[in-house]
Every structure is written in structure tokens, then in C-alpha cells.
Amino acid sequence: MENILSILVFFPAVAGLLGFVVDKKSARAYGITVAAIEFLLSLWLWFSFDSANAGMQFVEMIPLIPDFGVSYYLGVDGISLFIVIMATLMTLIGMMSMSIKENVKNMIVTLLFLEMTMVGVFVALDAIIFYLFWELSLVPMLYIVGAWGGPLRVYAAIKFFLYTFAGSLIMLVGLLFMAYVYHNLTGVWSFAITDWYAMVLPVNYQLWLFAAFFIGFAIKVPMFPFHTWLPYAHGQAPTIGSVILAAVLLKMGTYGFVRFSLPMFPDASVMAITPIAFISIIMIIYTAMVAYAQKDIKQVIAYSSVSHMGIIMLGLFAMNAEGISGSVFQMLAHGIVSGALFMLVGMIYDRMHTKEMSKFGGIAAVMPKYAVIFGIMTMASVGLPLTMGFVGEFLVLLGFYEISPIMTILAGTSIILGAVYMLSVLKKTFFGPITNEAVKKLKDLTPLETWSLVPLVLIVIWLGVYPKPVLEPIDNSVKAMLTFMHEKAITPEAKEIIKVPQTIMEVK
Amino acid sequence: MMETLVYIALFAPFAGSLFAALFGMGKRQVFVGIVASALLFISFVASVMLAIYVVKTGTPIHVMMMEWINAGDIRIPFGFVVDQVSVTMMVVVTLVSTVVHIYSIGYMDHDKSFNRFFSYLSAFVFSMLVLVMSDNFLGLFIGWEGVGVCSWLLVGFWYHKPDQPREVNPSISPSWAANEAFIMNRIADLGMLIGIFIIYWNTGTLQYDEVFAQLPYLPQWILDAAAIALFIGAMGKSAQFPLHTWLTDAMEGPTPVSALIHAATMVTAGVFLVIRANPLFAMTPEVSFFIAALGTFVAFFAASMALVNRDLKRIIAFSTLSQLGYMFAAAGLGAYWIALFHLAAHAFFKALLFLGAGNVMHAMHDELDIFKMGGLKKVMKWTYLYMGIASLALAGIPPFAGFFSKDAIIETAFNEGTYVLWIILVVTAGMTAFYSFRQVFLTFWGDERYKQYGIHPHEMYKFVLVAMSPLAVLAIIAGFFQPWFHEFITTLLPDYEMSHHTHELILVLTAIVLAFAVGGIALAYKMYAKGLKRDPKVENSFIYRLLANQYYIPQLYEEMISKPYAMISEALWQKVDLKIVDATVDTIAKFFYYTGDGVRKMQTGNLSNYLNWMAVGGVALLVVAALSAVIG
Amino acid sequence: MIGLEHYLIVSAILFSIGLVGVLRRRNLLMLFFATEVMLNAVNIAFAAISHYYNDLTGQMFAFFIIAIAASEVAVGLGILIVLYKKYGSLDLDDLASMKG
Amino acid sequence: MLQPINVSLESLNLITLAPMLIAIAGGLIILIIDLINEKLHKSLYVMLTLLILFIDFGAVLGLNVNERGFFDVMMIDGISIISQLMVIAGSMLFIPLALTSKRFHEFEYPEFFALFLFMIAGFQFMVASDNLILIFVGLETASLSLYTLIALHNRSNSYEAAVKYFTMGALAAGFFAMGSAVVYAMTGSIELYQVAEVLAARMSGAIEPVPVIAVLGSSILLMVAFAFKLSLFPFHTWAPDVYEGASAPLAGYMSVVPKIAAFVVSIRIFGMYIDLGVEWVRDIILVLAVLTMTLANVMALVQQDVKRMLAYSSISHAGFIVAALALDTTEGNTAIFLYYALFMFTNLGAFAMLWISRHKVRRFNNRYDHPYEKFAGMIKIVPMGAVVMGLFMLSLAGVPPFSVFWGKIYVMQAAVNAGYIWLAIVMGLNSAIAAYYYLKLVVYMFLKEPVKDVDTVYYNISKPLMAIIGLATVATVAAIFYVQPLISYLYYMISASGY
């Protein structure tokens, strides 16, 4: 089955269209089934994925607008594979744990379209197709936040849409210029990312293009100071929205950096290391402190995502396999952990109808299961060894140490500050005497909730103890990328900084 | 065969933990405790067998379980090594934990979270074993963090207790103390991580043997950096100044926890790290000397706080701190095997001491103020006996274990010619003797002050007392193994011999130390044996209050760190994030909106204005065109 | 001797007068007349220029302009009449129901 | 002693005139039919018009590129063909919108359809000639009929709109005439190709050089005339009012078809100037483009009425495209037509949606016909309608893969290729601003609760309208599949005619 990627992309969309016909009451079951099938398909993708091969696999290529160089061009490598799987998994889990009551059907349909766009972004190998899914993913999210969100939902939704949209339009200009340069060099129009990889650009071009792409990606990540849409989006979005947003949509930004900025502009990337590391450190420390100041438990998680994305950004610009593989792995870790945390927060919100931590306290006594799972996820998010969070964070910091010890120490404070705000959440929410009467009446997790969370717990521990099956393919592709960045780099300092690992496997 | 033993020793506690976890949320089941203890006993037996094997063959056992992290060029496996050092630790850890487990069956019998307790406790033992058995720095770090978490869980075991003001309860609440402990350790762990990074990027590996093999080829400053970074990690776990405050607060946890984690095992991890990495520290004399100096300082500093404290467990906690100081002093001075020996001996008598304190607590219905006790020896002989033995050992009175180990450390200080350290350590020995016996006398001797609080103390269950006996025996006899232990351990650790000069003076030195120790006991006897005589003048004196308030360091941290951090965070959120960063974005949006409002005013709807606009436009075009014609 | 430029200047002046009329007048009818003036200014120019080049195209253009001006007036007045029926006035300051 | 004038029919090459003649004849036929029997239902006229347009379309397809005819005043080159095709296609999309479920009396007059056909003939003349006279005649024919069509939609607003449009149109006509006079004065010719030759010669100084002031004057005068037609800032002032006054479909029509015609002429005239190296023309066009797209956008931000908002958005789109005109590259010109080809469906669709919601007598509130509130909660009333309208809005906002996006990136790509990266960035930012007001409608339709008399949003629905909207939707959504042939056809035609 060579066209499995197309199936992966369009199956949810088709299912979404058909979903309009499905009766309201059974819509949810329909959605879960579809998402499950999609997830199995993605697992199949993994199963038939050749992890010894560092290059693009399952490649499909159909010219769409030859005169303009646009073609329908898909493929996965170790880097994108697992993000795709995570996207399908989180959609499935999110639907299972979904607590929305009113127009469930619209929600299901919207989610299925969203899933299409998410998968599409990560498997697209044509810049325009990438851009297409990238932009399209805003629409369902706009609807989810706007229709099921909190009191400020419309403001939050529009802010999210416009902010990202504006950024990505600058990126679009970058894409077009890239194509123009490619056309000048080769006389052919092409938006194929793999073609662009082959281009060696003069440094000033690289810088300009890097800047253009940076704006698009940085807003999505979101990097300080472009992050302010995130707290609103998360704060207002329904649980499922936050889950998808944190788990997958934010990864689009960082993925963009891996897919475009690093391999296309190696020299510019090397020059950008210091500023980006600087921003990342601000993200890590500043947002961690802001998170500590929050009263609303969901906002804490929201800001903590920004902080973790800082770690990821830092790793991407470590320019060595340890750092980059680590940060790709950290994308998955953060996706699953923060997704789970948002689900947990949603569950308590469904019971208490508030997210104010001051209203909680002593919940551990009445909801032990909940407390245990929350505790595990907290530990994963503060990067405890043998949880998923540690592997990524450790590798990132290890990797970046080679670039700058001082900055690594600063970034390393995340393990302290992370503990500070997460533990204070635990203390305020779960520990201490029960002050609020409502808490006494709380029911522990329902079986459905439990079973939607347990898989995540298992994954978090499994990949914390034995990350190899995931880390190895990622690492292979990253090594291949680094080797080729090193070859491509023009400036000597870039060649020096981009570290080609001793143990490489050739791209088939 | 031996490999299986290694795995048994390692995973038996883990199994116990999981088993207990199965019933974690259920109601109290005695068999859970029994099973857990049994599994630990198995682990203990396995450790002993391994120890015997290592003693006999003298060859370490090295097992490679599986790969863990492979990325870029880094290869980190789950590998375990059982050599002289780790096997010693294993035996000590498993022995003490077994005792503590059995003890807990009795101690926690009224607690509704009985099962949960055992799952945590066994989990802790597992992590501790990972820590000591790992064959690489990152494996050690796993255990390092693991024990941290378990300690967090166990200190905060009674999470439902509310926060209280410092005056009422110096460690605000169990959950607070737990978080404090975790965060302080995290601060140190960062140092440790950095150390690991330094080692990796300079040696390309994290396996102990490979790393140590490469050390000689590294520049001195890198060695120093690595040593400092690692030691920062050690400072956190072993609660060395200035990261010491969490240890006394950790006493909020159940007493068995204090006995196991905060006396016998976890807190010694820092010392273990220094001993483990002795090749590194041996090459960095300055750092080592700093370690010794800091250790000595902490020994004295902690002892001074113990002098006036009224809280049974806190006194013992301070003494733990002080003894850790001794161990670091020894390690810093290069006497690694002596440090390890003191570590083991200390584990036995300190655990015994804590468990005894637990009995007292149990008897006094969780009352800890020794001013409210007294005369307990009538009702609780065995406990009295145990605590007496333990205190004697702690005070370093021959022939108890503490004498041999501690005396050796003090001699080392003399032998190294660091006389200042030596003097301080000697004085501290005296103080140690004083506060431990102050506590013994106030608790067991004199008038029965508890009566006026209407408490009816009773002796602990028999099986508990029996369970404690091995520790008592070891507290007495452990010292005599010193020569044998010496030649066993020095097959791995660098040997440390006293110079002739010291040998000649050895009796004098011992005499001096003993004099201080006995003096301390005598003073304590004179002041407290007849019962409590409080002197307001003394208690209000500046020194007394300074010591009683731990030099106001917790308050200082609160004022200088916690509160400012909270304030800054709040400010960053309210002032910067909302008022500046976010506001800017909205302003840009508003700008366009208001421009729109402004521009649309030209759309008056009046035709003649429109016509004028056309004319104006025409003129404007003319101007622009003319300009560009002139310019370009 | 009257040369081309004189004609052109005349036509320019006329055109300006027409333009000013268009800009200043408030009565729609007057406004139309002003536009007619402008068109006729153009006619003068065309006539003069075509004589200058002695080439007929210019005059042809002029004729077309006249025709178009006529039809413009026809349509324009038509609309004006309906408008007058509706509003009862031709003052274009009353004619601003749509704005913003 | 005059020579007898004899002209051979072959030399006239009347086939080049055929399309316009068909349209005119069609108009006359309709009038005659009405004379014979005036009780015929409008649907007959609608269908007749469609058929005539259909034949017209065929006739245009039958033309071959680069022919001249009728004393060489007709010029059938690539762009004249594609622009005629687009004009007719647009008209064919428009005319069925007359078949509403409610009676709107302008469609009861057969004259409406006759005028409509005359207008089309006018546009065709405009684009099919490089003779300033013919262009002027075509322009005026089309405009005059258009004024009348607007006025026919009998409402006080429509009269006002007609008058405003008419008066300003008259002024513009004056400017155009004066401009051509100056051109004539400079070159002694009004055939653009000759004008180009003479000007080239005079500016190169081969013969006695032309005064710069004359070139300046001519270009500016003509520019004003066409800036008015293309509704460029600050000559756009008529547009919002006229769009509001005219019936929704007509407004949609005006935002596309007349502009295509105007663009063709602009390409011919200003392209000529730029080719002659008159850089300021390029500059003023760029200035106009940037001003138009930005200011129209910000004005659209603050509108309360959807129709008015769409008016401003059409203005801003026009500004967007004019930028392509300034590039004066084949890609740029292709971009213009591609953009309109794609924009036509979406925009007509959007206006048709408004038309559906248009009440016969009642206004939604005393000022506006289509305020945002009217569409609040549409998803709950007519879900399909809301979705379709949402699609149109997203497409207009330039969200891929909907039609306008492809136009946008093609224009931006053209700008980038011509070295105007800053222009591309300005375009990008403008699309971002624009997204706000399109989203505003989406938000109202999807995220708000219905307010009052919910029937208004589908008051006017009828099969033909649904058919047209369906067509527009398909064209909007499926753009990605027909962009390629479209581009290659347009590019071929345009490069064939040397622009």
C-alpha cells in the first residue's frame, strides 16, 4: 500500500463529510470509530516504516499546477512519522474523553477535518501543500474555540486566527521567494521541499528567508514575545481544543523549523543560534515564572507549554544529533504530557465548573485515581527520569551544552522552575485539608475517563524506559539531515558548529 | 547465577512496591506490609550473597540489562555493577530497609493509607538500589531523582494536614516540606546534570570505568568544573549548607521514613557519589579540600542547632546532618573508605535512634516535645535501651560503632595536618555527645512531665522491638569489623593509612576525643538527668534564640527567595505579559481599526465631496508623478 | 496670427472652468452643464489639433464626443427627473443617505 | 475632385465585429419581442439573454488571435479574446440571478435585458480595440447602460447611486477625452500602436522631442479616468454607495466585469507608457495600488453592513490587482486575468448570497439592508447556506485551497519575480488585515445566536439562484484542479498578444 499517506490524509476528511449524514446521537461513536481506524492506519504506517532508512518514505507525487511548480507531494521520514502518529492518537483519545454535550456532531465533523489538516501538514513535502494544510488547520480550530469556548471565546478565536494568519502570510512570501530563487537557478518552477534542499543559497538570502520563515513559525510555536494568543486560546478553548492545540498544532511551528529553516538555511540557522537561544531562555524562565503566578490551573498548563516549547526550540538549534533528536522526541513528550494534563484539567472542570485553584484543595483524598494520574503526568512534565519528559529534556540540554554551557545552565533552570510551579499546583489542588464543600462530593474518574488516560500514562512510562523504537528512527533522519546541512553550509563557522555525528547511516 | 541474584536484589523491592500499589487505594491490609517486607528480606539475602561472592572473588559483577538512550553519539544503557562499594551500600540499604519495613507494619498499623505507604517505601528502596548499583552517571541520576520523588511522596505522606505558621510548626506542613525538599534537591540536581554534561562532552561516555580511565588526559580546569558540579548535586541530597533546611523539615514524614530515608540511606547518597567518583575528586585537591572544610563546618553548624532544640526528631535530624558533615570531611580529605565505613555504621545506629524515637512518639501519641516527656524508661525499657545504645554509638563511646568510625575521621583530620578542622571536629564530638544525651535524659530520666498532659505511654509491640534488635547489635559490634572492612574495601577504593607521626600520637588523640565526648555526656547528665530545669534568662539569650531558630535561615530564605520570586512572577504576569506584550499586539490591531474609522470619514456621501476627492486625487497623482520624474 | 497654442489654451481654460463648475456647483443640472463645457473644451482641442496635423481623425473624435455628450445628457436628465420626483430637489447636498 | 471610395468587404474582416453585433442584435430582438407582446414573463427574457450570450461566447471563441478588422480599428488579440470571454461568462453567471422567488420589478422590464446586452457589447468594443475613439464609445455605451440598470432597481438609494455614479462617470469621461486629446496633440494619432511608435521616436529624440509636461498630462488625465473605473483610492468614493444602492447581484457584477474591461484598456494604455520607459506611471500605479488595498481594507474593517463591507473588499482586491498591472510583465498581466477569473465566482457567489437574503420591501434596519446582525446564527437557520457563505468568505480572505488564494499567490509570485518583494509583503499583510472582516461575518454566522425574523436570510431563495451559487461554490472549492489549465491558457493568450 504505497499511497497510505493519501489515505491517512483524506480518510478523516471523507469521514467528516459523511459525518454530516450520521445521526446526532451516534455522531460521537462514529467519530471515535473513525479516529480509531485512522490511528490504526498510522500504526500500520509505523509498522511498514523502514527505520533503517533515514530518507523520505511512502513518497507520492502528482503534479497539480506544473506551470507554477505546485504538486501533490507527500512523504514521511523519522521526524514526521511519530508526530503524525501522535496527532492521530491525541485526536482519538481527545474524542474518547470528550465531555461536550451540545452539537456533538458539529464537533466531531470539525475534529475530523482538523485531523486531516494536521496529518497533512506533517506529511506534505510540497511547500504549497504544506502551507495549504497549515492555513486550513486554523479554520476548524477557530470554530472549536469560538463555538464551544468560554466567555471570551470569540476574542480568543479571532486572535488565534489572525495572529497565526498574519505570520504565515509573511512565511508565504518567503516560500514564493524561495521558489523564485529556485527558478532562477534551475529554470524550473518547483515548490518541492526536497528540491529546495538541494539549493545552496548565499548567506544574505538565507538570512532574509530565515527571517520570513521565522515569523511564520515563531508565532505558531509560540515563541516569546509572540506567545500571548496562547493563554487566551487555551483559557477559552474547550478541553478537546486545548488538547489538540497543545499536543499537535504547536508542534507545527517547531516542525517547520526542522523541515524548512535548518536544512534549507544552515548558515543562517547557525548565525541565529544565539538570538534564538536567548529567546528560548526567556521563554523558559519568564513563562515558568508567569505560570507560577497563575490562579487558574488551565493557565498554568498553558504557560508551561510555552516554557516547554522553549526547551524544544533550544534543542533544535543545538546543531548536533543529541540536541535535535532530543527536541523532536520532546515534541512528542510534550504533546502527550500536556495533552493529558489538559484532559485532566478538563475533567476537574466538568465536575467543579471552575478552574480556580483556590476553589480546590485536598482533592487527592476524594479522587485518588485522578490524583495518581495527575501526579504521574506532573512528574513527566517536570522531566523525571524514566518518564518520557526526561529523555527529551536531557538530550536537549546535553546537546545545547556543546554550544554554550552558560546558556545551558540558564535553560536548565527549567527543571527547577518547572518543579516550582507544577508542585505548587499539586499542593494547591490535591493536598491540604478540604476547604470547599463541593470537593467533598466529587466523584473519582469514570471508567471511560480512566481508560482514555491510562494509555497515555503507559506511553509516557514506556517511552521513558525504552525510547529506542521511537528515538532510533528520529535519530537516523536527524543524523542524515545534519550530515547534509554540514555539506551544504557555506561559511566555515557553520561547518564547524554543525556537528556531524560519528555514527551515521546513509540516506537510501 | 550471580546476574540473577543482582536482578533479584534489584527488583524484589520493585515487585513489592507494585504489589502494594495494587492495593494502594484499598483499605489497610496487613499482608501487604508482610509481603513487601518479605520481598525486601529476599533482596537483603541476595545482597548478602552477592557481598560474600565479591568478598571471596574480589571481582565485581557487571550486568547490562538493556539500552536506554541512544541518540547522536551518546549511548546510555541500563547497566549495573556490583563491586565492593555498591555491595556495601546494598547490604546496608536492604538491611535497614527490611528492618524499617517490619517496623512500619507495627508503626503504621492505625493509618488508613497503610498499603500506599508500603508501595512508596519499597519504591524508594528500589530507586536507592538503582542509585548505588548503576554503572553510569545517568543511571545514578535516575536513582537520584527516584529517591527524590519517593522522599517527596513520603514526606508529604500525610498530605491532608493544613499549613501552619512557622511559630506553631517550623516546617509548615507535610506537603510544604515535601515540596521544599523536592525543589531544593532539584536545584542541586541541575548542578549534577551540568556535571554529567561536562563529563560527556569531554570523555564521550558516562560509564564510570571509561570516564575514570580518561580523567588523566583532561585539563585540570575541566576536572575541577566537573568535580564542583557533581558536588553541588551531592550537597543537595546530603543536605549540606546552604541547602540543608529541607532535611529537618522532612521530619514531617512518618518516623520510619525519617529513619530510612533521612538518616540511613538517601541523605548519604551525596557521600556515596563522592566515594564513587573518587578518582575524579582525588585529582582535584582544591575541590576536595573545600568539601572537607564544608563538611566540617556543617558538622559543627548542625550540632550547634541540635544543642537547644526541643523536638525529638529534629534533634536526631540535626545530628544526621552533623554526621554527614563528618563523612564529607573524611571523603574530602581522601579517606574514602573511612567515609564509607562511617556511612555504614551511622546508618545502623541512626536508624536505630530514629526507630526508638518512633516508639516514643507512638507511646506519646505523636508528641515530640522532649520538654513534655521524661521518666519514660520505666514504661519503655527496651526503647530506652535501644536509644541508649544508639546515643552512645553516636557520641562515639567505645566499644560502640560510632567510636571507631568517627574517631578515624577525626584522626584523619589531624593526620592531614588540617588542625583547624581537627579542632572543630573534636569540639563537635563533644557537642554531639551533649545533645544526644540531653535528649536521652530529658526523654527517659527525671520527672514524668507527660502526666500533666494526660498521656499514658506504653511500650511498642514485641515484634517491632525484635525487628529493631539487629540494628542494636550492629550498633554495638559494627566497629570491630573495621580492619576487615578496611582490607576488603581498599581492593577498590584508594587505601588511606595514618602516618607514623599520627600513629605515635594515636592514643593521645583518642583520649582527647573521648574526653570531649565523656565531658559532653557528663554535662548533659548534670543539667538534665534530674529532670527539666528551665532557665528563662538562657532561653531568651540571643545565642539560644539564634540556635533555636536555626540561625533564622529558613526565615531568610522565605523573605529573600520565596516571597520575592512570587512577587516578581506576579509582576511579570500582570505588568509585563498582560500590560506590555499582549497590549502591544492589541494596540496594533486597534491602530488599524481606528485608522479605518478615520479614513471612512472621507466617505461623506456628499457627491460634491466625492468630485473634489477626484480632483484632489488628480492633483496628487500629478505631484507624485512629477516627483518621481524629478527623482528617478 | 492665431496658432494652435491659442486654441489649446482656450480649450484648457474652458476645461478648467468646466472642472471648477463640476467641483463647485451644488445643483445637479448646473453640474451636468459643467461637464458639457468640459467635453466641448475637448472638442475645441481636437478640432484645432486635427487642423494642425490636417488629419481628420481629430474631428471624427470630436463628432463622437458630441454624440456621446448628447446621449449622456439624455440618460442623465432621465435619471434626474426620476430623482426629482422622488426627492423634490436637485441640490446634491440633500443627496447623502448613503455614507460611511 | 474627390476619389470614389470603394472598400472591399474582405478587407473589413467583419467577423471581428460579430460578437458585438450579436449582443446588439440580441438586445434589439428582445425589444422587438416586447413590442409584439408585452405580457411575457421575465424568465423568457432571462433565457433569451442567456442564449444570446451563449452564441456571443461561441463567436468570441471562434475568433483567431491577432487579427485586425473594420478599417483596422478592431483589434482581436489574446487579451481581447480572454477578456471578452470573461465578460460574457460573468454576465452569464449574473443574469439567472434575475429569477428570484419574489418579484423585483426591474426584471419585469424587457428593456433591462436589452440594456444589459448593449452594455456587454460596449465592454466588448472597449476591449477589442486600440483606437481611443472606439474605446471611448465602448466605455460610454457600457457606462450609460450601467447607470440605467442601477437606476432601474427602483429605490431611492438606487437613484442616488445612479446619480453619483453618473456624475462622476461624466467627469471621468471628460478626463478621458482630454487625455486622448493630449495624446492626439503629441502624436497626431489615436491608434495606440501608432501613438507608441511616434512617442518612442519623439522621446528618443529622433524627431523633435515631446514636452515632458504633455506626456505627464496625458498619462495623468487618462490615469484619473481609469482609476475611477477601477475604483482606486481616492477615486473609489462612488463604489461603496453605488454597490449599496444597486441590487446585490448587480453590485457583484460591477465588482468584476466592468473592471476586467477597464483593466484591458489600462494594460494597453499604461503598459504602453511603461514600455516607453515612463517610470512615473509605474510609480503612481504602485502608489495607487498600495493606498487602495490598505485604506479600503481598513475602511472595510469598520463597516456594519456586509454589502458595504464587500464593496470595500472589492475595492481592496482591485488595488491588489492593479499592483500586478504596475509590474508590466507577462506574469503580471496573466495574474490580473487569473485573479479575476477566480475572484469572479467567489465574489458573485457572495453577492448572490446577499441577494437571497434581500427582502422585497422591508429593510433590516433603517440604515442598512444587510448588516452583520442579519446573518447572526445563520448556521442554525440554513446550515448549508452558512457553510457556503463561510467558504466564500474564507476564499476572499485568501485561505487555501479556495479559489482566490491561487490568484493571490500568483499575483504575489509575479511581484516577487519582478523584484517587488516589499510589494508582496504589503499584499500579505493586507490579506491578514482583510481576514478580520471576512472572519467577522463567519463569526456572526457560526458563533452567534439568531436575532430576529430569521426568514430574511433565505427570503429570496429559488432554484436558479441555488444553481448559480452551487456553481460558484464548486468553482471556489475545486479551484486547485482547474488553475493549471487556466494559467496555461491565459499565459498563452497573453504572451501571444505580446503583453
Image (cartoon, coloured by chain):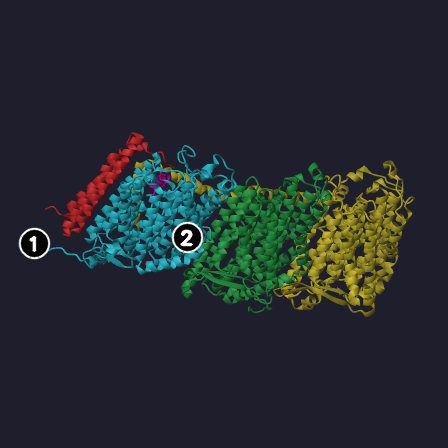
Chain colours: A green, B yellow, C red, D cyan
Q: Is residue D145 left or right of residue B389?
A: left
User: On the picture, is B48 further left or further right than A83?
Assistant: right
Residue carrying label 1: D1
Q: Indicate the quadrant containing the C terminus of chain D: top left, top right, bottom left or bottom right.
A: bottom left
Query: Could you tell me which residue is drawn at 50 percent across and 49 percent down?
Result: A164
Q: How many marks?
A: 2
- State the image coordinates of residue B183 (x, y, percent, origin top left): 68, 49
Instruction: Say whether residue B500 is visible.
Output: no
The answer to whether residue C38 is above or below residue B97 is: above
Please say whether residue D94 is visible from this viewpoint. Answer: yes
- Does the magenta-highlighted stretch encompass residue B118? no
Q: Work out whether mark 1 precedes mark 2 in sequence or the reverse, and give the earlier one.
A: 1
| Residue marked by disc 2 | D408
Label 1: few (<14), some or many (≥20) within 10 Å? few
Q: Give the distance between the C-alpha atoms of the residues marked 1 and 2, in whole angstroms.
A: 62 Å
Instruction: Measuring from the top left, give residue D14's x and y in whole percent.
Output: 23, 55
Region of the chain picked out in magenta, as a range: D236-246
Residue C40 occupies quadrant:
top left
- The chain letter for the residue carrying disc 1 is D
Indicate the quadrant where residue A88 lies: bottom right
Let me know if residue D244 is in the magenta part: yes
Chain assignment, label 2? D
Q: Decide which of B233, A239 is in the foreground and name it.
A: A239
- Looking at the image, residue B592 sits to the left or right of residue A322; the answer is left
Magenta stretch secondary structure, dominant: helix
Image x and y of residue B263, in percent: 79, 52
In percent of width and height, residue B526 lies at: 88, 44
